[in-house]
Amino acid sequence: MADKLSRRKVISSFGLTGLGLLASNVQAANSNPISLIREGENILFYSSLVELKESTVLKAGNVVQTGGYYQIGDGGEGTYIIRASASEITPDGGGIISLKKNLIAVLINVREVNYKCFGAVGDKKNDDGVQIKAAHDYANKHRIPVINLSGEYWFRETTAIVIKTNVDWGQSIFHFDEKFNGKEPRFKVLSDVAPYPIELSEQAKDSLISQLKPGAQVIPELAPYKNCLVIVADSGDMIGLRNQSTGISRGWAREELFYVEEHGRIVGEMAWTFKNYTSLMAYPASDSYLTITGGTFYLSGDNEGNYVENGIRIERSRTLVSNQWVGLEPGKQDVAKIQRSGFYSLRMVYDVVVENIRLIPWEKDRPGVPMVPQGTYGISGNRWMNVTFRNITAEGSPVHWGVFGTNLTKNFRIENCMLNRVDVHFHCWNLYIKDSKVGQRGLTLTGGGDLFVENTLVNANAFISFRADYGAKWDGDIRIKNCRLVPRTSATQVSVLQFVTADFDFKYPIGYGRTLSVQDMVVDFSGQQQSKAVCWLMKTSEWVNNAGKVRLFFPEQMDINNVSIRGRKQGLRLFQLYDCSKYYMNKEGSYDGVRMESNCRILIRNVDLEKLNPSPLSAVKDNVHFYLNDTSADKRPDALYPDIRFEGCRNMDLYTGNGTANLRFENCTISRITKNVPPFKGRLSFTNSEFIPEVEASAERIYDLDSELGVSFSDCTVYMPEKSGQKMSDWLFRIGFIQINKQVRFNHSNTRLGNDIIQYCKSKSIKLDSNFIGMLKSHHELDAEL
């Protein structure tokens, strides 16, 4: 040819297949290369890197092509330039190779690397992690991706393999011998820029502290730290004390994390107000996305070390991990004696997505053998923001611990996942769960901000169990829509929302959400139709000692709509307001005996209620659908003053105690309303409702309705009292607001008697008095009752 070709073009013109054919007649022991000559330039070919190392004819400046690392065609081929060795050059087994005659071969023309290029063997004996680590070190140094689409590799002692460039593992298989798990994970995904402390002048620090509070949108002092995740903490202000069965209470420094954009714009709403800080750190976010995709990971299951890492730790913001399978080696069992951190562990990161993953939770509560002493996780992490888990499958049996374990997270999303648990130990701010299934370990949460759960099934005894050890709190808005709770077969008590906690000072406000909405919820007993488990919409705690210290809060708005029981006849109960005077609301309310000013609106519509056998007042707390009480004669303006409306609820059994509220009932059936104190402080109104009195032997009245602001009936119907389904005509006089031909109490418009009462009167030749009928038709509380 007339034109000269570069070395790269020469190599490309032959390709590996052609080079392999040229090498087919070379004896394996021959250290003399084939020479590919084009217009005066030599390209030397060796069948393998092993053969290259034995060559004695090389000289500086030679360009060499190999057909493999150990043998031709094994995937370890590469192109090298031969140079003189120097003391500052360290061979790495792939990018730089030691040769005879004080020469080295330097890998060139590399756009990507694989593990075979660095000598990974895959023979079940070699610790391939050594060569894999070298490959990533080379890729990180030269800013090129690792593309290793196939092969099978075994890890023993190698850990802390740093990833800083894109990785495609394709269908590669990795075997981890967990006997060698340690404090470092197998892979660490790191940023190029290390975190650093933010140093401010005293004046700038004071200005910053004054702006660290809910609602902050721009903090000019942080403008120089744009594109950073910022974490601020005050170790002198401990909050979130953990109440444990051991009696040990550990707290957390008041801490906040957020991302800084241009001109100090803050991304991520703040939960806390600060008086000072002891740490202010910037974690620079990368200005590109790093992707890690593919790969199958087999784990040996015999971890014996301390609390250890065992998979991939992500410490780089803007990282995408996808398309992976994680499980035990075929034929192996999880026999670990000590707990693990998550196979996926996220720390101090912003904007991360983990998707299309099959994972396993770890065993903890094995029958007949010692339990793993603490929580052991498949996914763990702390101090992350804007992290999404999508299409993750990690289910387990009753012996498996929850797959998730997290602390200090913000803007946490779960989409289209199947998990055996989602667990937030301390302080999640904004959690979104959609189109998912959560297994027997359930949703165990604490924190605040948005809690939105949609189109999700939970197979546990509570749809959401707010963690008792951190105060069973959610300081924000709760939205549950189109979800299903499938209780476990062993359940004796079930709750849609469980806010049960100890009477303990957690050093921050706790409560049941700032607003609460449950729409189209099904509690499904179809697989256990004989279950007698008591089911509560919301289970709360009765506080006596610490309510004034802790500042309990209650939702300003509750909207409960279409909650149904499926698979059994026994319905559910609502909730208990043990003492409205102990709550602290953001808005003020009042009651002066003339009117009540509400600071809380509650709507409960179309809820399948359990038909209860009435209990004596001494046992009423846990045996009514709704319990309302006050213990303070002098309520604070910021105590709870609720306006409650019930619509379309059946079999209602309520206790109104010494409560202060307005209660309205529309299209309901009411079995009993009781109290054991003087008149109710508030108003009762009943519209288009039915009264089916349920008899309790010790009660003077079935409906104890005396209320300071009045009682009104509009288009209501009153039926014969019943006991266990039997009509009890001798209890007609104990209904409480009417006596046949004798008395009509309170305000009535078109109240009618049920046919069972009318038929009874006919059978007993009791003629209904026209004055009595007129009072049912229209009666005012100021008119005579008799």
Image (tube, grey):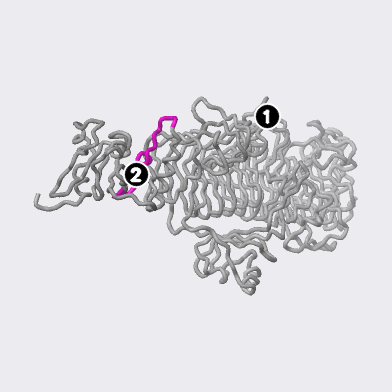
In the image, is 103 to the left or to the right of 36? right
Image quadrant in which you'd find residue 535: top right
Amino acid at the residue labelled 1:
Pro
Measuring from the top left, give residue 48's x and y in whole percent: 29, 37
Q: Is residue 10 visible?
A: yes
Residue 333, disc: none
In the image, is 470 to the left or to the right of 225? right
Give the farthest residue toward the front: 101
User: Could you tell me which residue is drawn at 70 percent across and 46 percent down?
Assistant: 667
Label 2, residues with CA under 10 Å away: few <14, some 14-19, many ≥20 = many
User: Could you tell me which residue is drawn at 63 percent across and 61 percent down?
Assistant: 279
Amino acid at the residue labelled 2:
Ile
Mark 2 secondary-structure assignment: strand
Magenta segment's dominant SS is: loop
Mark 1 secondary-structure assignment: loop
The answer to if 345 sits in the magenta stretch is no
Label 1, residues with CA under 10 Å away: few <14, some 14-19, many ≥20 = few
Measuring from the top left, give residue 632's x and y in whole percent: 86, 56
Image quadrant in which you'd find residue 31: top left
Q: Which callout, 1 or 2, points at the residue further toward the start of the chain?
A: 2
Measuring from the top left, give residue 95's x and y in whole percent: 35, 46
Q: Which residue is mark 2?
A: 97
Q: Which residue is mark 1?
A: 370
Measuring from the top left, give residue 429's x and y in whole percent: 61, 54
- Residue 399's place in the image compared with 188, above or below, is above
Between marks 1 and 2 in the image, the one whose residue lies nearer the viewer: 2
Start-end of magenta stretch: 107-125
